[in-house]
């Protein structure tokens, strides 16, 4: 028996003049979780598509249990016992749990599908593998993202695979659901499965992986033990730069208060919040799920108006009861749900960028094509947005470039206060650095930034001050220089005594 459940040896793949894979290799042991990391464009997606039989490599081979295969297709890959859990839930929303689990492999008696038998078997499998009970007659569209993930994994396990590939499985999950997912992955490893785990979230890689392969420019530049190698070193291998360069922080002289929040309340979400953002300042906001931080950000953009308290911009009190009014006052929101709320996927890059500033490219009620094009081209160049052109659909862009387009929309309007909700979620390390550079550029130009993030190194690396929320209240305000990740997490968890809270103004 081979020491490896799966090997990809010396894969190369070209698309025209683009070299997507360059002699890349990957080896996965039995009963182990093998991480695969790299920036967007590093070759991860191409390697997985080769493994799935979607792309035929120009050179290289696949080895399963010591047997070599040079030509293979998706049907053969499935027969070899390799199954995939994709980032997108590929389950029809109108199917029941039982129908989704057995779709394409239905239980038959003669020519008839045994629906009741499928429902009973679905309940048994979910209980056996995950200790989870879901009504087998429930519709997929009624389930949470985590429950859909469990159904998708169970569906893959029905065929008793040798290898499971998890492709960015946690993108749509909240923290509690991520922990459940990682527990499932560990349990599957204990059952002897070989698992490939692809994620932008290095903390997940550290928690669950036995070995990690790092791809850069289509090559496997390292295979490391994450318990013996720091995440900082893995990051350096991915981006080929030192981690100190991750958080480019400009030296900006802070100006007068730009945004002031005084005794703001929206019960039961948050209460008596005092907060200040000065011109040229990056202010962090963090808290655990349910802390009220997200609700506060929505209120500051007029999406969920406060019940009492005051919001001031440039010293003038505002009554923000709609997003339209917030935009008119110069407040911008970059939402966490980028693909659903931040950009219009089926519109072009140009249409997205000028969406919030159409009046500025309009003459006599008609859009000036020249004005719109000039404004778009300037921002595409300034933000280094990688697209086929201004007329390319935003759907075709990478996550990092979609985020740049979402930011460009507000830059086109020349907003003064930027509310950023998890701005780097779901994008690769290299794209994060570019987003951080753009945030620094905003404050250099005199804007104020309120950055809501659960990424503690991001907060510590970018922010001047950090507000911490717990159960609807601000429990601490500190200079970022006075904090580290452990103390910030302790504050967010309210494990510091209230009397120990010191305010940094």
Image: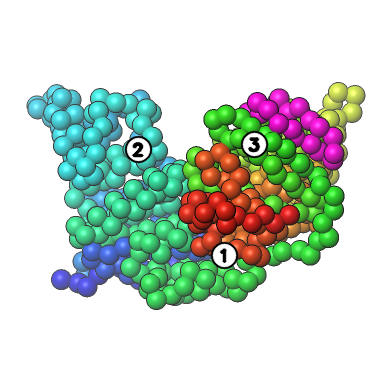
Left or right of residue 201, residue 75 in this image = left
The residue drawn where x is 19% and y is 34% is 123
Which residue bears the numbered disc 1?
A: 484
The residue drawn where x is 84% and y is 40% is 314
- Note whether residue 76 is visible: no
Residue 397 in picture, x, y percent from top left: 60, 47
Residue 339 in picture, x, y percent from top left: 57, 39
Closer to the chain start, of discs 1 and 3, is: 3
Q: Are marks 1 and 2 in contact (CB under 8 Å)?
A: no
Disc 2 residue crowd, few under 14, some 14–19, many 20+, Cα 10 Å = many
Give the foreground label among 1 and 2.
1
Which residue bears the numbered disc 3?
A: 272
Q: Residue furthest left?
A: 110
Q: Are marks 1 and 3 in contact (CB under 8 Å)?
A: no
Depth check: 153 or 102 in front? 153
The residue drawn where x is 39% and y is 49% is 178
Q: Which of the 4 image quarters holds residue 80? A: bottom left
State which region is magenta: 304-322
Which residue bears the numbered disc 2?
A: 148
Residue 401 in picture, x, y percent from top left: 63, 50
- Determine the secondary structure under disc 3: strand
- Determine the secondary structure under disc 1: loop
Q: Is residue 305 magenta?
A: yes
Left or right of residue 336, residue 412 in this image = right
């Amino acid at each position: 028996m081979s020491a490896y459940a799966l090997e990809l040896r010396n894969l190369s793949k070209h698309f025209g003049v683009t070299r997507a894979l360059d002699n890349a290799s990957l080896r996965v042991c039995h009963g182990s979780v093998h991480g695969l990391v790299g920036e967007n464009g590093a070759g991860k997606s191409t390697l997985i598509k080769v493994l799935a039989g979607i792309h035929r490599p120009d050179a290289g081979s696949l080895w399963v249990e010591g047997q070599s295969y040079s030509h293979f297709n998706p049907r053969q890959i499935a027969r070899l016992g390799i199954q995939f859990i994709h980032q997108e839930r590929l389950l029809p929303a109108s199917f029941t749990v039982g129908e989704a689990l057995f779709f394409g492999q239905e239980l038959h008696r003669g020519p008839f599908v045994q629906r009741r038998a499928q429902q009973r078997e679905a309940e048994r499998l979910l209980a056996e593998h995950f200790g989870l009970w879901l009504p087998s007659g429930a519709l997929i569209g009624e389930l949470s993202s985590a429950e859909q993930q469990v159904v998708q994994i169970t569906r893959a396990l029905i065929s008793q695979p040798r290898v499971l590939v998890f492709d960015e499985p946690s993108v749509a999950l909240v923290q509690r659901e991520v922990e459940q997912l990682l527990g499932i992955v560990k349990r599957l490893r204990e059952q002897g499965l070989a698992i490939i785990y692809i994620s932008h979230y290095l903390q997940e890689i550290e928690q669950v992986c036995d070995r990690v392969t790092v791809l850069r420019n289509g090559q496997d530049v390292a295979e490391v033990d994450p318990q013996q190698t720091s995440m900082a070193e893995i990051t350096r291998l991915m981006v080929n730069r030192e981690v100190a360069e991750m958080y480019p922080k400009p030296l900006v002289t802070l100006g007068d208060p730009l945004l002031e929040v005084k005794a703001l309340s929206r019960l039961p979400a948050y209460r008596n919040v005092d907060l200040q953002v000065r011109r040229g300042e990056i202010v962090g906001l963090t808290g655990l799920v349910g802390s009220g931080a997200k609700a506060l950000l929505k209120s500051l953009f007029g999406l969920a108006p406060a019940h009492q308290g005051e919001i001031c911009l440039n010293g003038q009190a505002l009554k923000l009861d709609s997003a339209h009014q917030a935009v008119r006052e110069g407040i911008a929101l970059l939402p966490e749900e980028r693909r659903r709320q931040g950009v219009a996927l089926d519109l072009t890059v140009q249409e997205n960028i000028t969406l919030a500033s159409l009046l500025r490219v309009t003459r006599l009620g008609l859009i000036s094509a020249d004005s719109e094009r000039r404004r778009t081209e300037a921002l595409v160049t300034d933000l280094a947005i990688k697209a086929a052109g201004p007329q390319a659909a935003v759907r075709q862009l990478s996550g990092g470039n979609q985020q740049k387009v979402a930011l460009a929309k507000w830059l086109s309007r020349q907003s003064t206060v930027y509310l950023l909700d998890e701005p780097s979620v779901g994008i690769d390390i290299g794209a994060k650095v570019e987003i951080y550079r753009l945030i620094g550029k905003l404050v250099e130009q005199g804007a104020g930034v309120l950055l809501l993030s659960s990424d503690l190194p991001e907060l510590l690396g970018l922010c001047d001050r950090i507000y911490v929320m717990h159960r609807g209240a601000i429990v601490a305000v500190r200079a970022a220089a006075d904090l580290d990740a452990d103390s910030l997490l302790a504050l967010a968890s309210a494990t510091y005594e209230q009397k120990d809270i010191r305010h940094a103004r």
